[in-house]
Image (spheres, rainbow, N blue to C red):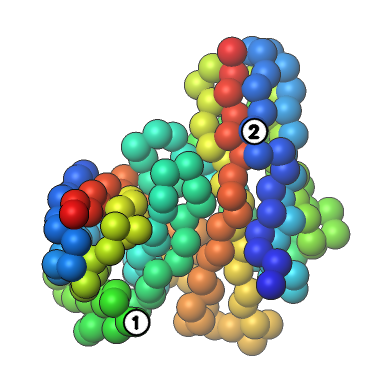
Amino acid sequence: GQNIDQPTEMTATEGAIVQINCTYQTSGFNGLFWYQQHAGEAPTFLSYNVLDGLEEKGRFSSFLSRSKGYSYLLLKELQMKDSASYLCAVRGQSHTGRRALTFGSGTRLQVQP
Amino acid sequence: DTGVSQDPRHKITKRGQNVTFRCDPISEHNRLYWYRQTLGQGPEFLTYFQNEAQLEKSRLLSDRFSAERPKGSFSTLEIQRTEQGDSAMYLCASSLVGRESTGSSTDTQYFGPGTRLTVL
């Protein structure tokens, strides 16, 4: 099975940097995804990591360490519109047939002025 | 650019009634997924299709739930004899994987706006 842990809530200040951590335990691994979800809306894709290291995409970066079962999402130059839930999701290995994502419960980020 | 669409966006029904939801994936996406999300939780996988074939079903998908994708394009999710515990947001996602894929592709899933079901 798969188990994903991430903090329930975080608060940060506009213009600052925030790091949202995610740890996972999985019987197989074929990629880790981060999604952003505003209240009442669908999740939107932010980033994908399958190899160790940092992936940077504008104000958002995501890091993966497969040996540690650990990832983080880094948000720079925070804006009020970044207030949302951030979902960490893991995909199992394809030879098991499991293509669906297993999501964590999400981290609700509140950006304050 | 047309994303994933779902219909209806909201559905209120009485316990015991049947409901059906529709999902139209991004054009040419060959994989289609159904998830369920309750308040404060991440989406939970229900089932997925590659083209018209249903390849995997979660243990969450009881006998009251059935999904189809008859022509490999849109999909429907039906819940029979609804229960109050079925109240949730039902999300559909689609992705594109090449025929030669060995499973190493990104296979990024793009989500629709969801159908919010309330069972009274």
Q: Is residue B27 visible?
A: yes
Left or right placement of residue A60 versus residue B27 in this view: left
Q: In the orientation shown, which residue stands out farthest toward the right?
A: B71
Q: In the orientation shown, which residue stands out farthest toward the front?
A: A113
Identify whether A62 is placed above or below A54: above
Name the residue beneath numbered marker 2: B10
Identify whether B89 is placed above or below B26: above
Instruction: Please give the name of the residue rendered at 30% of the width and 53% of the height, measured from the top-left corner.
Output: A83
Helix, strand or loop at mark 2: strand
Q: Is residue A86 visible?
A: no
The part of the image, by quadrant, that contains residue B28 is bottom right
Q: Residue B3 in the image: x percent, y percent? A: 66, 64
Crowd band around label 2 with a 10 angstrom C-alpha radius: few (<14), some (14–19), many (20+): some
The part of the image, by quadrant, that contains residue B78 is top right
Q: Are marks 2 and 1 in contact (CB under 8 Å)?
A: no
Instruction: Please give the name of the residue rendered at 74% of the width and 56% of the height, measured from the top-left corner.
Output: B24
Identify whether A101 is placed above or below B119: below
